[in-house]
Image (cartoon, rainbow, N blue to C red):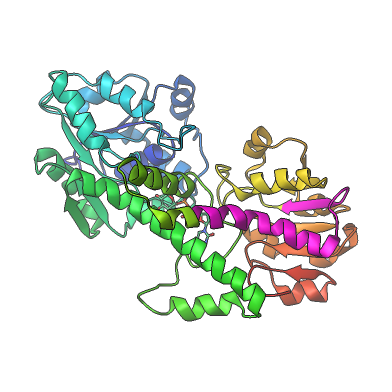
Amino acid sequence: QSQREPIAVIGTGYVGLVTAAGFAELGNEVWCVDIDASKIDLLNRGEIPIYEPGLAESIAANRERLHFSTELGPALEHARLLFVAVGTPPTYSGDADLSAVHAVVDAMPASDRHALVMKSTVPVGTGDSIKRAFATRGKDGFRYVSCPEFLKEGSALADFRHPDRVVVGDDGDWAGQAVVDLYAPLGAPLVRTDIRSAEMVKLASNAFLATKISFINEIANVCEETGADVEEVARGMGLDARIGEKFLRPGIGYGGSCFPKDVSALKLLAGNSGYHFQLLNAVIEVNELQKRRVIRKLQKHLGTLVGKRVALLGLAFKANTDDMREASSLVLASRLQGEGALVSAYDPLAETEARKLMTGVDFADSALGALEQADAVVLVTEWAEFKELDWKAAAERMAGTVVIDGRNHLDAGELAAAGFTYEGVGRGT
Ligand code: UDX
């Protein structure tokens, strides 16, 4: 194990920390660098700035191989491969903000022995433009590899350990081969290709999965009109190996740090290069409207929402994370307030993040607390604990009886038995 190559990871956010922990598990020394001194202090005290199942344990177990610093020097000294895992959030125009990536590029010295390995999601062509920047500054010995990330929040470490595939885009040099060797112990299928194609794999994969979700959401909406049950339909479709059962769960629209951003980035990338990617416009629009359909369902049961109390169960963009980025709950809460409703909410993990982004919401410490005097409940995030909720006790605390299940997560029969008017997605009433 001591022969494993030492590496550096620049950016100790979500992707950076999981990648660092994953390689430390494989026996690599990992030099983690971040410009945020408070984050580095936290990590050096053994605390983990984000929530991800198993991450704290993994970092603790491999602590001696992990080094955290704000200094680039030691990383450059010990490692040839510098993984870049800095944020590329959308700008006002919807394009990716590459300023953090450029700052990393600018900080690199002239070197014949180093390579940047891009983990951050970047537009197609970024690798080539970074290579040009190196060349014009006399740093053309610096190598570049694209190695996109496919981690899902909530199962990111498992995704690192058992990837569906490893994609390495490079110029056929030592650096690409070194990245291939680094991942070899995981035994995953390898796609070794050119840099632009590797960059495109990431955007196309996320856009395809988002399309799959918007597709099943539209099927669900048609099921509501025609009396079919989308859960049965999805089961019947998913068994076709060409379709597959995954990412065929209808719901309240996709959110998170990747799908909304990457779909819009691919649409704009196509547009900027002169191609009108029509399908993605529909994917985005369906997703926007899907969040808002809940309002119509509430109005159908309650009439006007003015002065009505609506409880949101779950706020995070999906279960098992505290991440609120592009969460459907944000649009929903503000639309409800716009309709004059009072909003109470409970999330087992995301309340701290949610408080930074939501105003005028009454946060409760428990699901039952949020349901106090509520006229209706909307299940927004599929947390396991909502399945276990004592719905008889809930009925006694509520003023009304409406439950809108945005994820088809609850047992319709149990809710009906407890006296609720239950409505899921694509399952009729
Ligand atoms: C995603 C990609 O899956 C991952 O490969 C990429 O690296 C980053 O983006 P993540 O954002 O963590 O990962 O979450 P994911 O589990 O993919 O869910 C994204 C959104 O789609 C969530 O809001 C989720 O609730 C929603 N979703 C997912 C559905 O509505 N239906 C589904 O069937 C699956």
Q: What stretch is highlighted in magenta?
A: 283-312
Name the quadrant containing residue 207.
bottom left
Q: Is residue 76 above or below residue 56?
A: above
Q: For residue 321, say whether it is visible.
A: yes
Q: Which residue is drawn at 50% across and 49% down?
A: 53
Drawn side of residue 152 relative to residue 137, left or right:
right
Residue 86: horizontal and vertical position, in percent? 38, 32
Name the residue nearer the viewer: 369 or 124. Answer: 124
Q: Does the magenta stretch include residue 309?
A: yes
Q: Main secondary structure of the magenta part?
A: helix
Q: For residue 26, say whether it is visible.
A: no
Q: Residue at x 49, y 22 (%)?
A: 38
Residue 359: horizontal and vertical position, in percent? 73, 35
Drawn side of residue 179 relative to residue 99, left or right:
left
Q: Is residue 5 above or below residue 215?
A: above
Q: In this view, does 15 lie above or below 215?
A: above
Name the residue nearer the viewer: 50 or 29. Answer: 50
Residue 178: horizontal and vertical position, in percent? 15, 42
Drawn side of residue 116 relative to residue 164, left or right:
left
